Amino acid sequence: MIYVHVPFCRSFCIYCDFFSVAVPKCSGKQAGEQAGLFGRYAELVVNEASVRADEILDAVNIHGSPDTLYVGGGTPSVLPFNVLERMVSGIGSALGRGTPFKYDEFTLEVNPDDIVENGPGYLAGLRSTGVNRISMGVQSFDDGMLRWMNRRHDSAEALKAFGMLRDAGFRNVSIDLIFGIDGMTMEMWEKTVDRAVALAPEHISAYQLSIEEGSALGRLASEGKYREADENQCRAQYDMLCAKLSAAGYEHYEISNFALPGFRAVHNSAYWERLPYTGLGAGAHSACISGGLLNIRRWAVDDIEGYMSGKSGGMEYLSQENIETEQIMLGLRTADGVPEEILPPAVVNDLVAEGSLGHSRLPGRLRIPEDRFFISDEIIRSLT
């Protein structure tokens, strides 16, 4: 499993606190400098892949991680295609693989406006590099909500981009949506969900808006200019989402993720299963094996200049208690749950009796039932 962080965005969404730097559209000398920045960054990612090749290959060949590549951000679709292609082929070469290499799953995160602007030739190029899954940040089909979020696209552009992806032959497309926004009515949210269902993407991720300290929204909240949506409103929107997607044939396999049969996100599912992965690029995180245990967390410096100058990030070792807590916290986010034996029996009995835990589809495992997913944090806290 490889995650590549592309920390570039044309503009910042109001809610985002992920590590990224602004790269506005420009021309002339500035455009040349920006292209140079993109190219140098891609080269460093390839160099990092070469240095960590044994770690990457061992995770797949020895420890059973799926052979996946996920290019996220930031906004990877702001990269010129030739830069993205060099980076992907360079990673393949660094690992001693052919180009293009066929991963079990190769996901690229994109913005709708980039798809529309770059056109069919760009999409054909993505397919030629081996991209077989697209994750597109739609967030809403309400133009007012999109403007408030400071998104660069409108609903018409999102629809056009989705159609272009289909025309280009992509048959594994995920779209992101956001609910739980103060001022978003049930009617607005229902129209967005209905529009998403009508498109029939293979995968939908839906997240309740959270206020992150380092985001523009966090600053607005601290100034008293925004307040969190009412919890009852958020619960009603989540319940409606679950009901509509279930009726449309989607499997609710993780708290925020829904998939048509056979289209669970392979890469993300491995995170929740606590399998090792390697993060490449500035601000990327990794989970590594030591002594037969997945007990090392590594992260790169979240600074472009620092990353490019070779500045190191950080590392921590997880105790056995940390590992078990993490296994519970991640596993109980999913419909497959966790092995019953890792849970404290006394607490489990009470939670089963009240309906907050039940048996999953897998033998010997317990899960949080879907109708309790919304309060999963409270349930998990009682077990850790």
Image: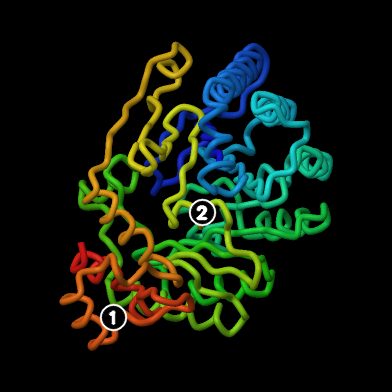
> Of residues 244 and 367, which is closer to you in this image?
367
Please identify the residue farthest to the left as the structure is shown. 346
204 versus 95 height, above or below: below
Please say whether residue 30 is visible from this viewpoint.
no
Q: In which quarter of the image is the C terminus?
A: bottom left
Residue 117 in the image: state x and y as whole percent: 73, 41
| Secondary structure under the numbered disc 1 in the rendered image | loop
Task: Check disc 2 and report the residue beneath it.
Answer: 268
User: Is mark 2 in CB contact (under 8 Å) with mark 1?
Assistant: no
User: The disc labelled 1 sits on which kind of residue?
Assistant: Ser
367 versus 104 height, above or below: below
Q: In which quarter of the image is the N terminus?
A: top right
Residue 149 in the image: state x and y as whole percent: 45, 52
Residue 118 in the image: state x and y as whole percent: 75, 39
In the figure, is residue 239 to the left or right of 127?
A: left
Among the two numbered marks 2 and 1 on one chain, the one whose residue lies closer to the N terminus: 2
Residue 184 in the image: state x and y as whole percent: 41, 68
363 versus 97 height, above or below: below
User: The disc labelled 2 sits on which kind of residue?
Assistant: Asn
**Quadrant of res 121:** top right
| Secondary structure under the numbered disc 2 in the rendered image | helix
In the figure, is residue 73 to the left or right of 77?
A: left
Question: Callout 1: few (<14), some (14-19), or many (20+) C-alpha neighbours within 10 Å?
Answer: some
Residue at x 68%, y 31% (from the top left corner): 88
Task: Check disc 1 and report the residue beneath it.
Answer: 356
| Label of residue 17 in the image | none
Question: Callout 2: few (<14), some (14-19), or many (20+) C-alpha neighbours within 10 Å?
Answer: few
Residue at x 58%, y 56% (from the top left corner): 266
Q: Number of labelled discs?
A: 2
